[in-house]
Image (cartoon, helix red, strand yellow):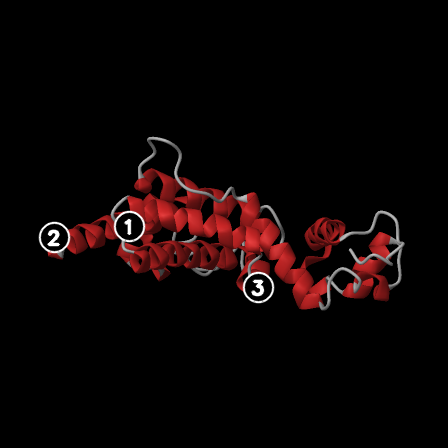
């Protein structure tokens, strides 16, 4: 806060928290600086003591959603596979906890120093477990992209069925029908779980290939 800002109770964190609460009510398209200012009982210019632009506010909101998932390295005795599984599920839950949460995070243009420090701790832990820095970076970012993409699809079209709503069983190819009956379609929890397991198994295979190719 600037030294000459005398507005009591108004801070950058207050803006972020109120912005997230308002996001749940009106969605990203309805979230404006004017509406946020009205929610806080101030005029719009008062907000610019704490954020320079609306994008900076959205970046801070996205950062808050990311950190709420619980960033940081694996726990003691936790394998990197279990850690990635836990991290991905916590990240997904945090994105889903806010309306348009995936859109906020996907559109963010920067990360705070705190988030970058936690990210560095995660990379360091993966390197200690045999990853190269590049493989560690690509693994975490690819997993984040998978989670964001799946949540973005879920939040954009939460009720989308695997087949057209007016389709009869005669309209659906037999294998697709059997798959939907057995697996619940491509947009639910089981589909997410399958993709996450395939990602972790693929990462393990990539790490094994890298270690096999490295000189002893």
Q: How many marks?
A: 3
Q: Is residue 41 left or right of residue 165?
A: right
Who is closer to the viewer here, 86 or 168?
86
Residue 90 appears in the picture as rendered: yes
Q: Residue at x 72, y 57 (%)?
A: 26
Query: On the picture, is 29 further left or further right than 156?
Result: right
Residue at image x 56%, y 67%? Answer: 109
* 215 and 88: which is toward the camera: 215
Earlier-in-chain disc, 3 versus 2: 3
Report the residue that reaches farthest toward the top: 77
Between the C-alphas of marks 1 and 3, the distance is 27 Å
Vertical order, 216 against 134 (above or below): above
Cβ–Cβ under 8 Å for marks 3 and 2 = no
Point out the tag, 2 or 1, that comes first from the N-terminus.
1
- Image coords of residue 21 (percent x, y): 72, 49
Rounded to the nearest angstrom, the CA distance separating label 2 from label 1 is: 21 Å
Tell me, yes or no, if residue 184 can be seen here.
Answer: no
Location of the N terminus (image quadrant): bottom right
- Asked where in the image residue 144 lies, by quadrant, the reply is bottom left
Residue located beneath label 2 in the image: 212
The residue closer to the viewer here, 3 or 75, is 3
Residue, disc 1: 198
Residue 170's x, y, as percent? 34, 58
Give x and y (percent) for residue 121: 43, 47
Q: Residues within 10 Å of mark 3 (few under 14, many from 20)?
A: some
Sooner in the amino-acid sequence: mark 1 or mark 3? 3
Q: Which residue is mark 3?
A: 108
Q: Nearer the viewer, mark 2 or mark 1?
A: 2
């Amino acid at each position: 806060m600037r030294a000459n800002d005398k507005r009591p109770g108004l801070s950058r964190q207050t803006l972020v928290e109120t912005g997230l609460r308002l996001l749940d009510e009106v969605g990203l398209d309805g979230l404006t600086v004017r509406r946020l200012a009205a929610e806080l009982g101030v005029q719009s210019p008062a907000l610019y003591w704490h954020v320079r632009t609306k994008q900076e506010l959205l970046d801070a909101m996205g950062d808050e959603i990311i950190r709420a998932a619980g960033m940081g390295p694996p726990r003691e005795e936790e394998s990197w596979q279990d850690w990635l599984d836990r991290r991905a599920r916590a990240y997904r839950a945090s994105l889903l906890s806010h309306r348009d949460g995936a859109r906020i995070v996907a559109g963010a243009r920067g990360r705070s120093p705190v988030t970058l420090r936690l990210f560095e701790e995660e990379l360091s832990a993966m390197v200690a477990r045999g990853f190269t820095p590049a493989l560690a970076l690509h693994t975490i970012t690819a997993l984040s992209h998978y989670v964001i993409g799946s949540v973005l699809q879920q939040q954009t079209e939460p009720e989308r069925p695997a087949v057209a709503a007016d389709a009869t069983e005669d309209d659906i190819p037999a294998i697709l029908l059997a798959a939907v009956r057995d697996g619940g379609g491509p947009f639910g929890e089981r589909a997410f779980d399958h993709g996450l397991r395939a990602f972790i198994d693929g990462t393990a295979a990539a790490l094994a290939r890298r270690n096999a190719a490295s000189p002893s």
